[in-house]
Image (cartoon, rainbow, N blue to C red):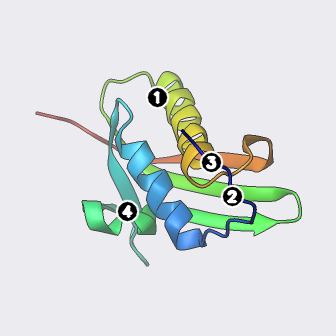
Amino acid sequence: MSETIAGSLSVSNDVIADIAGYAALSCYGVVGMAEQLQGAESVRLLAGQRLRKGVMVSSDESGLRVDLHVVLENGVNMKSVCANLSSAVAFTLAEIAQIDSAKLKIGIHIEALKSNY
């Protein structure tokens, strides 16, 4: 039995980034989150506890924007993976952080492809 408690929920951008990062990792075709190295043309695949560096969260009067910098598995259909990724992150943020999906914009940046061979 669920009981509703009156009040408001405030979630920091770091927590939103963590939730979005873990939701992204659960998607098929996503190898991990990526961090752009300063002054270099390459990216670094982030370890599980540092996912937040691959997710940029910003907000304004129109809502919340979440930019995911991901590394995908080579050979996957990028359009399908991105659609699934966007849907999964939006659903997870709506369920856990109670963020209205109508006010949420998700940007996906494919930083690299990684082969399993």
Separation of marks 3 and 4 at Cα, in angstroms: 33 Å
SS label for mark 1: helix
Separation of marks 4 and 2 at Cα, in angstroms: 32 Å
Residue highlighted by disc 3: 3
Residue highlighted by disc 1: 81
Rendered-image quadrant of the N terminus: top right
Q: Earlier in the sequence, mark 4 or mark 1?
A: 4
Residue highlighted by disc 4: 51
Q: Is residue 108 visible?
A: yes
Amino acid type at mark 3: Glu
Viewer-side label of 3, 4: 3
Amino acid type at mark 4: Leu
Q: Is residue 55 visible?
A: no
Q: Is residue 74 above or below residue 70?
A: above
Instruction: Kindly check if marks 3 and 2 are in contact, taking CB atoms under 8 A apart as contact.
Output: yes
Residue 38 locus on image (x, y percent): 43, 77
SS label for mark 3: loop
SS label for mark 2: loop
Viewer-side label of 2, 1: 2
Q: Which mark is residue 5?
A: 2
